[in-house]
Image: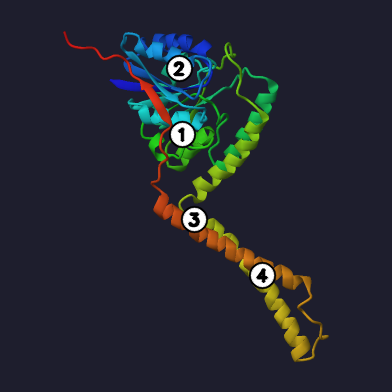
Amino acid sequence: MRKLSIVVPVFNEQGSLAELERQIREVVSQQALTAEIVFVDDGSRDGSWELIRSLAAAPSTPPLTIRGLRFRRNFGKAQALRAGFEAATGDLILMMDADLQDDPAEIPRLIAKLEEGFDVVNGWKQRRLDPWHKVYPSRVFNWLVSRGTGLTLHDHNCGLKLFRAEVPGEIPLYGELHRFIAALAHSRGFRVTELAVNHRSRVHGHSKYGFRRFQRGFLDLLTVMFVTGYGERPQHLLGAAGLFCFGIGGLGLAYLAAVWILGHGLGLLPDVPIGSRPLMFYSGVLLLLGAQFMSVGLLAELLVAYLSNLRESSPVVERVEPPTSTPE
């Protein structure tokens, strides 16, 4: 029987957790699978952890069990998801938000789509119930991500995603790269598709949206483009930029050398000093810039070669597990 691990990052979502657990349990009980919810409390201050503990401590009722992880402070959604993925024991992993905007009733459709031969099913909030100042910038962001990564999706940042258990182990997840899970999986050769899903209005809590999110998102997009395109061969990008600067700078110096020989040496041109020409300065700067690009590229290659397996320690300080039954 398939086992589904549902990873739910939590940050001040006390009002919605019990209802989310009830809705997930209702859906899972109607499917031929076992499931677990892994709540990851990302430094909540509103009593979310106490509620997670009470849900996990309740008598286990198959086919759904509850587990919980708690961070000592807020580390961000990417860290919470990574900890949840590491703790998940299912062969399918579903990530979803805790604010009830993601509909658990979509779980059967997501699984059916995955079983068509895909590795990742990305949700698409086709009818999005959010304010306009979130919807339209999000469309621009999704267009940029699709163009920059080569994976065309309508909603890269949808919090509802289903994938096979081997996917998280092959993609880097730090900072705020959780927005690009589908694109990162695509770069590793996993088969990615999308599915239009139901999106609901927020009932409890408040949005974590802010303008800085798009600023950070654009910078993270540059990171993803570099990681997916040149993450294992950084010298191909930096070295190419260095060779370009070397070439332009070398042509400038070669031109000045020819002018000096024809003027000062052979007298075929007016004898004008070349040391005071702006071209001399620009050519020298380009040569130095080219050397720096290539040096940084070599250092990056060393980092890729020797630190590729480096993993950051997990910030989890406490965890709860469902009670185990003892044989009578």
Examine the image and state in which quarter residue 268 appears: bottom right
- Residue with the mark numbered 3: 300
Asked if the residue at tag 3 contacts the one at tag 1, i.e. Cβ–Cβ closer than 8 Å, the answer is no
Of badges 1 and 4, the one in the foreground is 4
Residue type pointed to by label 1: Val
The earlier-in-sequence mark between 1 and 2 is 2
Residue type pointed to by label 4: Gly
The earlier-in-sequence mark between 1 and 4 is 1
The earlier-in-sequence mark between 3 and 4 is 4
Q: CA distance from mark 1 to mark 3?
A: 29 Å
Question: Looking at the rendering, in which quadrant would you find the C terminus?
Answer: top left
- Residue with the mark numbered 1: 192
Examine the image and state in which quarter residue 148 appears: top right
What is the x, y in percent for residue 110? Answer: 44, 22
What is the x, y in percent for residue 230? Answer: 50, 51
Using the image, determine if residue 101 lies above or below residue 209. Answer: above
- Residue with the mark numbered 4: 249
Q: Is residue 163 visible?
A: no
The earlier-in-sequence mark between 4 and 2 is 2
65 left or right of 42 in image? left
- Residue with the mark numbered 2: 49
Q: CA distance from mark 2 to mark 3?
A: 41 Å
What is the x, y in percent for residue 129? Answer: 62, 17
Task: Give the residue drawn at x 40%, y 32%.
Answer: 119
Q: Secondary structure at mark 2?
A: helix
